[in-house]
Each structure stands twice: as structure tokens, then as C-alpha cells.
Image: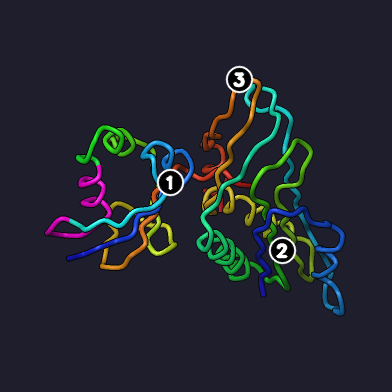
Amino acid sequence: MPTVRVQAADFDVGRELESLTRGRKDVGAVASFVGLVRDANDGREIRGMTLEHYPGMTEKALEEICREAHARWKLLDTLVIHRVGPLAPGDRIVLVGVSSAHRGEAFAACEFIMDYLKTRAPFWKREDTAHGSRWVEARSSDDEAAGRW
Amino acid sequence: MTTVTLLYFAGLRERVGRSREEVALAAGTATVASLVQQLRSRDERYGEAFATGANWRVAVNQRMADAGTALASGDEVAFFPPVTGG
């Protein structure tokens, strides 16, 4: 069953990924992705950012994406943790973890979940730069990435 | 009368100047498109936010929807810019 959490607090990557394998002997592979806040974007220095989301829909959208991944690949478990609120450069934003018997499914599903999250989960980033703050524009490359699946 | 709850997020919330409101839909077919048309004609702020070609997305009852989605009384309709999480 997918685990989905939206939270302001940071998360411990090791401990979270361990939850995918604890007490089981059928897991052959765990693939994961960690997204972090960069200190630059579109040629501007980023001092921090604030992540807004749509409480209620966000969790549903993430669960739906995980369910879709389970329908497409033979997976044992999926995990998505996404942070909201103010974040600083270097902070973790998102963790995706996927467990399966073999690596191929885990790698593919992990990338799929991130690509779908980028275009379907209702989060919005507002960046703080030296010239004030601005909403981050969606990238067409993210639509193309999601369109591959 | 068909009444729906509207939510606005991120840049769109700033453009219309509010995060939530209740709206009675004008008589006739109730779809996202007819709602947008109604909002657009309200004032300059809404006119700009929902101008033809403006890049908004919509969710109805917390599921992604589109201009053709039908609306019923009590629906939660959320408008927002393309998402930028991850």
C-alpha cells in the first residue's frame, strides 16, 4: 500500500527507505529519488522558497499516482513524502521510494512517480531572490517528461 | 440554484485577491467553461485572471478537470496555475 505524506518537517531518508524493507524478505530492490532546493534558478540566486499546496487534493493526487505506478509495474511498496512551507537552499523537498523484487521495476516506477508528481500534484513554488519573490513557472520539459509514460 | 465553492491557489489567488468564495451559477448549463465565462465578466481582476489564453488549471472535487467538466450544486472548484512541485 502506498504511503503518502505532506509535511512541513524534514525527513530522515535512511529511516524512511528502511520502512519499505523492514520485516520482509521479498524485496530485491529499492530505488529512491530525493529532490533538493538549489541556490540558483534561471540565472538568479535563490535565497529560499515557499511551497504552497492544496490540502486534501495533494494527498489524493499523490496516492493516485502511486496506485497508477502499482498498476503499471510489479511493485511491493511505494512511498512519497513532500514538504510544504518555507525551505532554504540545500533543504530536502521530496522523497520517492519504490520497492520491488527486481531493479528494473523500481527504477522505472520511481522516475514515473516523479514525472507525474511534477505535472499532476497541486504544489506551487514561490522563490525568494535578491530582486524579490516570484512564482516559479511550470516547464514544458516537465510535460514532455510525463508524456513519455 | 446551483451554488459552488471556489478555491484559488498560488499566483491565481493573488491575481483575484481571495482564496475562497461561494458562487451561484448563472442559469443554464453548468460547466467549468460557463463558470469561467461568468467570472471573467465580473471585473478587471477576474477578467485578467481568466482572459482567453490565460494559463490556468482546474480541479473539481479535488480531481483534475477541464473546461468541459459539468458542475453540480455543492461542488468544490479550484483554480490554479500549472503545478510546480517536486
Mark 3 near mark 1, Cβ–Cβ under 8 Å? no
Between B1 and B54, the residue placed more toward the observer is B1
Q: In 3D space, how far apart are the residues under numbered discs 3 and 1 (Cα atoms)?
A: 24 Å
In the rendered image, the vertical position of residue A89 relative to residue A25, given as above or below: above
Indicate the secondary structure of the residue bearing disc 3: loop
- Where residue A34 sits in the image (x, y, percent)? 76, 49
Which residue is at a point 65% across and 37% down the rendered structure image? A49
Range of residues picked out in magenta: B26-39
Which residue is at a point 21% across and 45% down the rendered structure image? B37
- Which residue is label 1 attached to? B80
Choose mark 2 or mark 1, whichever is in front: 1
Between A95 and A52, the residue placed more toward the observer is A52
- Where residue A108 sits in the image (x, y, percent)? 69, 57
Q: Amino acid at mark 2?
A: Glu
Give the number of the disc on residue A105. Answer: 2
How would you rate the neighbour count of disc 1 (Cα within 10 Å): few for under 14, some for 14-19, many for 20 or more? many
Q: Amino acid at mark 1?
A: Phe
Q: Which chain is indicated by disc 1?
A: B
Magenta includes B35? Answer: yes
Between A126 and A36, the residue placed more toward the observer is A126
